[in-house]
Image (cartoon, rainbow, N blue to C red):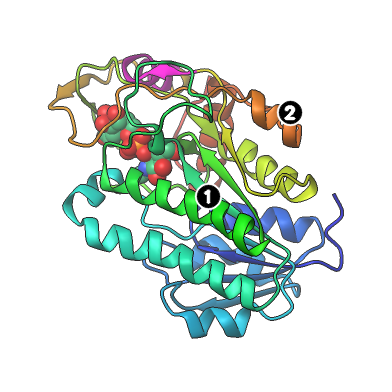
Amino acid sequence: MDFKGKRVLITGAAGFIGSNLTDALLEKGAEVIGIDNLFNGRVENLEEAMQNKNFQFHKGDIRDLNFLLDLFKDIDIVYHQAAFTSVPQSVKMPENCNNVNVNGVLNVLNAARRMNVDKVVYASSSSVYGDTPTLPKREDMPRIPISPYGVAKLACEAYMQVYYQVYGLKTISLRYFNVFGPRQRDSPYSGVIAIWLGNIIRNEDLVIFGDGTNSRDFTYIKDVILANLLATEHDAPGEILNIGAGSPINLTDLAKLMLKITKKETLGLIYSDPRPGDIIHSYADITKAKQLIKFEPQFNQEAGLKDYFKWYKNKYNVDLDIV
Ligand code: UD1
């Protein structure tokens, strides 16, 4: 799709997913307005974008409606990526999670409606399914979240649908399944792959919460960016689509694969207590996304991990031997 002449706005533009999306849209010729409160996001992630004359950055918060109203003028598409992203942190502070995620979505939708934005593409989450037994997860299955984070994401999806049905604002929700890749932070509340890559670089053992049988459908960032571009190109208003690799792996196998790829098999695996709020298994059926937006993931987990590790090695000049 040609984005030349399009004005797009990305919330959470300095974050992991938002900054990758910013770069991709700039490369496609769009004019990009990035906003971020820099709570989780980092300006460093926008180093390249800042050099581009088609990029503007504004520091501010999605909880501030006036801030959004000013910036949403003449915007064609909004990609709403800003969020409170951690499941365990949502267990500790459910009100904060609700404020950022649910109230934030309402502000984004209201601003988009008032300023006549064409389309809102929303970053939802596989956490809405909870621990229902049937796998893989299909969009029409029951959604019974088991964390405050999952509840908030489910409410946000429902708002996306209602703003299409009631107000005719074109929205689409992409239910991401455990995204990983360049610029994901290595902090205690980050995704497991970024944490373990940090451990590997520092020659530390990897800590697994639970018995290692928990599984996730880890999805490479480049496939998530592809899904966002396809969701812009194809019209599927009011829809919710799973975006995953469609090939789950359990945590013990993931840890061993990461150690194998980096030739660090001498490092150990430490099993610790399960984390409250954690889903046991998560695995995406991506048939609907294939049908509606022609989504075909390009990276299996091993290919994604290698691409990520190579990026990391080049960027930070670390001593990492990648098979
Ligand atoms: C992740 C995302 C969430 C997103 C969801 C679905 C993060 C921080 N969370 O949640 O925003 O909505 O996917 O796309 O990116 N684990 C360990 N050791 C560790 C850390 C985690 O064993 O050091 C385990 C966890 O207990 C869990 C699994 O790894 O079983 C995945 O955890 P995590 O990477 O935090 O992701 P989710 O909670 O699934």
**In the image shown, does 155 or 178 lie closer to the viewer?**
155
Task: Report the span colored magenta.
Answer: 248-260
Q: Residue at x 74, y 51 (%)?
A: 232
Q: Residue at x 48, y 38 (%)?
A: 180
Q: Residue at x 51, y 34 (%)?
A: 309
* Residue 294 percent location from the top left of the image: 76, 32
Which of the labelled discs sits on residue 123, or is there none?
1
**Residue 257 within the segment the image draws in magenta:** yes
Q: Residue at x 47, y 25 (%)?
A: 217
Instruction: Answer above or below: position of 110 versus 222.
Output: below
Q: Amino acid at mark 2?
A: Gln
For label 2, the crowd category at 10 Å Cα-Cα, with few meaning under 14, some 14 to 19 and many 20 or more, is: few
* Residue 270 percent location from the top left of the image: 18, 22
Q: Earlier in the sequence, mark 1 or mark 2?
A: 1
Instruction: Identify the secondary structure beneath mark 2.
Output: helix
For label 1, the crowd category at 10 Å Cα-Cα, with few meaning under 14, some 14 to 19 and many 20 or more, is: many
> Which residue was labeled with disc 2?
291
Instruction: Answer above or below: position of 274 versus 185.
Output: above
Could you tell whether 178 is left or right of 31 in the image?
Answer: left
Could you tell whether 289 is left or right of 302 in the image?
Answer: right
